[in-house]
């Protein structure tokens, strides 16, 4: 009986190590995604402030405004690497023996990474419902040779 228990513990330990390695890979992928999303969101926020400033102060159209509209339309979507976590969910979180890893992993996937998606959706809502409406009201857009956006009054 104890040999069977020992074999089962050894199998469980190997599986847990495999899951932790996969989780580590997912976390590295997520870190790169978070950094990219942060940079994109930060650039969008700065561009949003610039655009609102242009409208508030009625500045003339220049390259900075054109670039700001290009930046707010950049397609940056946060993609979560969650293969290992989905496996953990399907097997039951108790497959991870370390309480700290289990709790922090669950918190990250169930709360923190979902918050990124929520904030990203809110940013797109501002862009689509406010900024692009202003752009469409005040500017005529026409494509240029280099496919960047061109605005004229």
Image (spheres, rainbow, N blue to C red):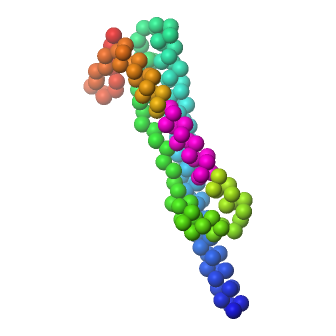
Residue 8 lies, with reference to residue 83, above or below; the image says below
Residue 36 lies, with reference to residue 43, above or below; the image says below
User: Which image quarter holds the C terminus?
Assistant: top left
In the rendered structure, the answer to whether residue 7 lies left or right of residue 78 reads: right
User: Which image quarter holds the N terminus?
Assistant: bottom right
Task: Tell me residue 59's x, y (percent).
Answer: 46, 8
Residue interval drawn in magenta: 108-123
Asked if residue 135 is among those painted magenta in the image, a careful observer would answer: no
Identify the residue shown where x is 42% and y is 33%: 74
Q: In the picture, residue 138 is in which quadrant?
A: top left
Q: Nearer the viewer, residue 152 or 139?
A: 139
Q: Nearer the viewer, residue 116 or 54?
A: 116
Identify the residue shown where x is 30% and y is 28%: 147
Residue 84 visible (yes or no): no
- Decide whether the magenta segment is chiefly helix, strand or loop: helix
Task: Tell me residue 139's x, y (percent).
Answer: 35, 15
Asked if residue 111 is among those painted magenta in the image, a careful observer would answer: yes
Q: In the picture, residue 119 is in which quadrant?
A: top right
* Image mark count: 0
Task: Tell me residue 39's x, y (percent).
Answer: 54, 35
Task: Tell me residue 143's x, y (percent).
Answer: 28, 24
Identify the residue shown where x is 57% and y is 69%: 91
Identify the residue shown where x is 72% and y is 59%: 100
Q: Nearer the viewer, residue 60 or 112?
A: 112
Residue 145 visible (yes or no): yes
């Amino acid at each position: 009986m104890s040999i069977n228990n020992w074999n089962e513990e050894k199998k469980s330990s190997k599986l847990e190590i495999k899951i932790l390695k996969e989780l580590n890979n997912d976390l590295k992928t997520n870190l790169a995604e978070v950094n990219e999303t942060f940079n994109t969101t930060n650039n969008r926020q700065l561009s949003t402030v610039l655009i609102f400033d242009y409208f508030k102060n009625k500045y003339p159209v220049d390259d900075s405004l054109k670039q700001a509209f290009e930046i707010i339309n950049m397609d940056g979507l946060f993609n979560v690497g969650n293969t290992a976590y989905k496996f953990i969910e399907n097997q039951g979180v108790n497959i991870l023996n370390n309480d700290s890893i289990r709790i922090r992993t669950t918190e990250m996937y169930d709360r923190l990474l979902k918050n990124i998606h929520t904030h990203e959706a809110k940013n797109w809502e501002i862009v689509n419902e406010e900024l692009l409406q202003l752009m469409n009201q005040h500017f005529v857009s026409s494509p240029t040779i280099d496919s960047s956006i061109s605005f004229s009054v």
